[in-house]
Image (cartoon, helix red, strand yellow):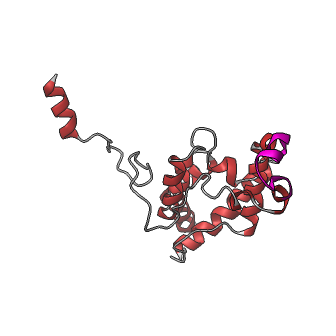
């Protein structure tokens, strides 16, 4: 029993499991598979107003939020552990429903605004029979979704960086000091 308990504690520590209880977007990149989504989000218009959990988990009550996070996280960790992740990640049906509901929750005024009926052709009939990202394809993750086609991230991702990593290299800092 002690060995099983010890192994369990070790797995929790190794997987950084407690970080998933937070709303920190960097928790989503504990495994490398979500890095493209994180990088494209950091370059999006949503970065300053919405984090991963604002869009990807239900907000109707706290129990449902953490149940969904646990269920989704278990699925993600299983796929990652089995190395069965697809080249391009797509949301599954339960996630699509949650994301769609959260789009409407945050943008309810824009969805129901009478001015849009005149400005955006066919917005009235299509706002209920389509998912938002059929038209708003590049929000918030942009066009790039492939594991192999995302650029580099300047901001270090804590899960993958050594604790002493700095963005500005030491040689550059020293040359800047010597010029002063």
- What is the span of residues highlighted in magenta in the rendered image? 112-125
Quarter of the figure with the C terminus: top left
Q: How many marks on residues?
A: 0
Q: Residue 35: x and y, percent?
A: 48, 58
Q: Is residue 171 above or below residue 122?
A: above
Prevalent SS, magenta region: helix
Q: Say left or right for 17 vs 180.
A: right
Residue at image position (57%, 43%) is 47
Viewer-closest of 144 and 25: 144
Q: Is residue 82 above or below residue 73?
A: below
Residue furthest to the left in view is 178
Viewer-closest of 8 and 142: 142
Q: Say left or right for 179 vs 127.
A: left
Residue at image position (50%, 47%) is 43
Quarter of the figure with the N terminus: bottom right
Q: Is residue 166 above or below residue 92?
A: above
User: Residue 168's quadrant in the figure?
Assistant: top left
User: Residue 90's quadrant in the figure?
Assistant: bottom right
Q: Say left or right for 149 vs 101.
A: left
Whether residue 54 appears in this view of the structure is yes
């Amino acid at each position: 029993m002690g060995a099983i308990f010890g192994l369990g504690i070790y797995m929790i520590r190794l997987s950084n499991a407690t970080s998933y209880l937070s709303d920190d977007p960097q928790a989503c990149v504990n495994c490398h598979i979500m890095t493209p989504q994180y990088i494209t989000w950091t370059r999006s218009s949503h970065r300053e107003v919405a984090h991963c959990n604002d869009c990807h988990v239900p907000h109707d009550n706290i129990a449902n939020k953490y149940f969904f996070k646990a269920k989704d996280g278990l699925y993600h960790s299983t796929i990652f552990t089995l190395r069965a992740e697809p080249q391009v990640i797509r949301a599954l049906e339960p996630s699509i429903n949650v994301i769609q509901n959260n789009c409407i929750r945050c943008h309810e005024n824009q969805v129901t605004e009478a001015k849009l009926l005149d400005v955006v052709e066919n917005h009235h009939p299509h706002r209920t029979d389509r998912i938002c990202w059929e038209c708003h394809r590049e929000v918030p993750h942009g066009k790039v979704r492939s594991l192999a086609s995302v650029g580099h991230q300047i901001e270090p991702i804590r899960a993958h960086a050594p604790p002493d990593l700095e963005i500005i290299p030491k040689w550059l800092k020293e040359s800047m000091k010597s010029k002063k």
